[in-house]
Amino acid sequence: MKEKEDVKKEFNFNQVKEEIKKHFDDSINVYKEELKRIRTGRATTLILEDIKVDYYNNLT
């Protein structure tokens, strides 16, 4: 009976560990994308990439 409990705990631990790893990886990827937008020294068009302008009722 003890083995079943140990296996169940291990499974739950591994499942939680994998979920947390996925969330951490997603957070790190978002952070990396945000860092790509930071530029020092020279102006770059990347800072304007996500800006939308209403042009004759069309967002462009």
Image: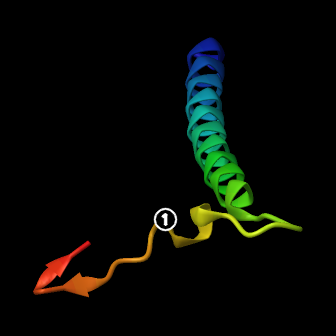
Provide the secondary structure element on which disc 1 rests. Answer: loop
Instruction: Give amino acid for label 1.
Output: Glu
Vertical position of residue 33 compared to residue 12: above or below: below
Quadrant of the rendering where the N terminus is positioned: top right
33 or 54, which is in the foreground? 54
Residue 40 in percent (x, y) is at: 86, 67
Vertical position of residue 22 compared to residue 8: above or below: below
Q: Residues within 10 Å of mark 1 (few under 14, many from 20)?
A: few
Residue identifier under label 1: 49
Q: Count up the numbered dots.
A: 1
Q: Quadrant of residue 37?
A: bottom right
Vertical position of residue 32 compared to residue 52: above or below: above
Residue 32 in percent (x, y) is at: 70, 50
Farthest right residue?
41
Residue 15 in percent (x, y) is at: 55, 31
Q: Residue at (45%, 69%) from the top-left corner?
A: 50
Farthest left residue?
57
48 or 7, which is in the foreground? 48
Q: Residue at (70%, 48%) from the top-left corner?
A: 28
Q: Quadrant of residue 53?
A: bottom left
Residue 26 in percent (x, y) is at: 58, 46
